[in-house]
Image (tube, rainbow, N blue to C red):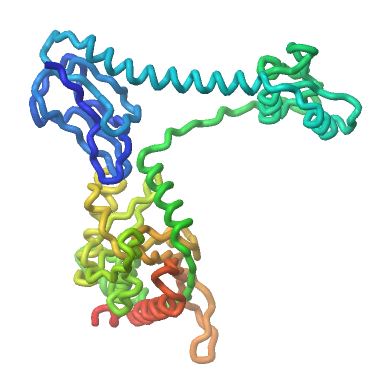
Amino acid sequence: MAIKIEMPKLSDTMEEGVIAKWNVQEGDKVESGDIIAEVETDKATMEVEVFDAGTILKILAEEGDAVPLGEPMAIVGEEDEDISELLESIGDSSSKEESGDKEEAAAAEEASDDEEYDPIFNELEEDKTSGSGNGRIKASPLARKIAEDKGIKLSNVKGSGPEGRIIKRDIEEYEPAAAPSVAPVVASREDEEIRISQMRKTIARRLAESKFTSPHFYETIDIDVDALFEARAKVNEVSEQKISFNDIIVKACSQALRKHPDVNSSWLEKENKIVKHGDVHVAVAVAIDEGLMTPVIRNTDQKGLQQISAETRELADLARNRKLQPEQMEGSTFTVSNLGMFGIEEFTAIINPPNACILAVGAIRDEAVVKDGEVVPGKRMKVTLSSDHRIVDGVVAAKFLNTLKGMLENPLSILL
């Protein structure tokens, strides 16, 4: 008996999936457990397996199509099985929805075009467009709206409706007279339309919720990183793999979070409580083509620099190749976002919910500084802490930043 393969729920926040790749074609035989497709969710590209053996009788969605949760993707059954009734039932439900939408839109358009002419409204419009109130332009509200959107002056359009009234068709068919050429013709370039990926949709939704739900405030501190430069150079002389400045910053943040548990907290609105996390799990923002992913280094405070460095590299590679699993991006208690490698000296970041804070790390810059009463060359770095004011107060954020500053200016303290 033929059955539908429906879009499964591959993540806890998934509402639809995009077919990234089909691994089968119509007519292929499959066994239970075979991976038939790769689906792009709001978090990662996941594999979809089939649970019933049989033949792929029909593929209902093409690569690149978005399929809502629970909607059919394909049909599997016995070879040469008649699936016309099953296809008809799928088609009926979708066609009814489409026809309902079209009828509603048509009714709205007809109602708009049939609205009576309002002499006051049109006279006021004539005052705006022609600078005089002596004449009236008769136009339906819908035609007037379309003309406004297209930048068409109603006074230039000849109406074909009753008493010369301008209707929707007149605006759509209007062709302005060619203006005399007074400058060289410049070639027009086409716009590029880019499909919004499931990941980009989720990033947009989560960041909008964070920005407009969590009352953000920002504090910036300037750090002397001369000693940090020297410490990193010495560590890399004996380290099997190179330690980055970001690895040291992540480690320092994890140690500072131990001293300031309020910063290592989450606001849980539905549960009506604040959770101060016992563990320290630091997320590191990784840039990919579609935005930012935030893989999590767990128990960061209990790991050494080499382990933090190795995990960060591995997770970053998985992120760039879209191979991160949902559990590798969940459970963070704090986030570090570093744009220093792009020359950005200072910026503010949006909190990664449900974290209380996120640290924005700027570039290390060379500048003249005063030490022991003398002007000498030095290296400085600005970091900005974005905090959720529902959890973290200004003084708490300031104390955390000063602890972090002390650690980075005296790198040996990170190991204590």
128 sits to left or right of 69:
right
Q: Outermost residue toward the front?
A: 116
Using the rendered view, name the quadrant where residue 22 is placed: top left
Give residue 111's position: percent from left, percent from top: 62, 21
294 sits to left or right of 388:
left
Q: Is residue 377 above or below residue 188?
A: below
Q: Nearer the viewer, residue 256 or 366?
A: 256
Q: Outermost residue toward the bottom?
A: 372
Using the rendered view, name the quadrant where residue 241 is placed: bottom left
Q: Residue at x 24, y 64 (%)?
A: 308
Q: Quadrant of the N terminus?
A: top left
Q: Nearer the viewer, residue 90 or 117?
A: 117
Q: Nearer the viewer, residue 315 or 57?
A: 57
Q: Residue at x 46, y 76 (%)?
A: 394
Q: Nearer the viewer, residue 344 or 370?
A: 344
Residue 158 showing in the rendered view: yes
Q: Residue at x 70, y 15 (%)?
A: 170
Give residue 14's position: percent from left, percent from top: 30, 41
238 sits to left or right of 284:
left
Q: Is residue 304 above or below residue 131?
A: below
Residue 233 showing in the rendered view: no
Q: Quadrant of the C terminus?
A: bottom left
Give residue 3's position: percent from left, percent from top: 16, 21
